[in-house]
Amino acid sequence: MTNDEARAPSPIELERRAFRRRQSIRSVLISAISTIVLAVVLWLTVINTPGWAQVQRTFFDPEVFVASIPRVWDGFLLNLRVLFFAVIGVLIVSLLLAVLRTLRGPVFFPLRALASGYTDLFRGIPLIIVLYLVGYGIPGLQGPTGARIPAAVLGTIALILVYSAYVSEVFRAGIEAVHPSQRLAARSLGLSHGKTLRLVVLPQAVRKVTPALMNDFIAMQKDVGLISVLGAVDAVRAAQIQVAQYYNFTPYVVAGLLFVVLALPLIRLTDWYSARLRAREQVGSIV
């Protein structure tokens, strides 16, 4: 037997390959047919309805769309700035809360109770209520002669307060998911508690919870638009101003598309990383 004959696939392997090809072709055909059916159903139930023309003029007017882009874009830049500082603040505060909640020993009970109360409180209060409390409560503490705090700053503080409670629980779950032997091994090598947490526990914890963290930050990208309730002229408030000017709801569509464009890269990155992590954990398990 020659080397080429030895390397040639067996009849069973050839049958398997042919079966996979047939399955792939079948899947493509089914996907194409289902897409066509869905498009026909949408055309019959939405586009072909009597009121579609009015909806199109109200929400999808091309002239209003183009005219409202500059104003909405200027407001969207404010959303990006708020998001940038909110992400940094949430990472710092949530990591601190997660570390406090994982401290062991009775001496740390007050800190654990404080961190637990914080997460319970701000996970239970709706974000819009926190925005009102912070937006009108903090300026009220300064009295009538206090300096005016920008609405974007107050909105950033409210976002940090709320999302730190959620993200801290994600970090805490990752920390507790690290096997105790990792911590014990690090301490046996002479590492202090702080170095063990920083060099051994946290890197593993963050890797385990990265997909969940990404989802939380995707949600925060959308909730940044709520700072408009405090009077900040962000994308949502700018769209509201344009709606009042043109008597048309198309500017809301413009603002929504901008938020979608902002979220899509992180959504795709989350999907890719989740699939990569799942494939690495399940390597060798698929027959």
Image (cartoon, rainbow, N blue to C red):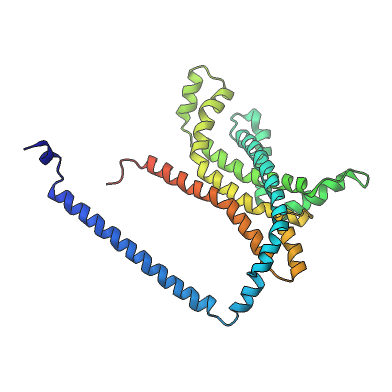
Where is residue 167 shown, x and y percent of the image?
60, 43
Quarter of the image with the N terminus in it: top left
Residue 113 vertical position relative to residue 37 in the rendered view, above or below: above
x, y percentage for residue 149? 83, 45
Question: As drawn, which residue projects farthest toward the bottom?
Answer: 50
Quick check: can you spot residue 170? Answer: yes
Identified at 91% across, 46% down, the residue is 143
118 lies left or right of 4: right
Residue drawn at the location 78% of the way across and 51% of the way down: 133
Of residues 190 and 89, the one drawn nearer to the viewer in this rendering: 89
Image coordinates of residue 184 in percent, x first then y, are: 48, 24
Q: Quadrant of residue 117?
A: top right
Residue at 46% over, 44% down:
273
Q: Is 146 left, or right, of 70 in this rendering?
A: right
Q: Which residue is at the front of the view, 266 or 111?
A: 266
Q: Residue at x 65, y 41 (%)?
A: 90
Q: Is residue 207 left or right of residue 127?
A: left
**Residue at the extreme top:** 190
Task: Report whether 265 appears left or right of 128.
Answer: left
Q: Nearer the viewer, residue 70 or 128?
A: 70
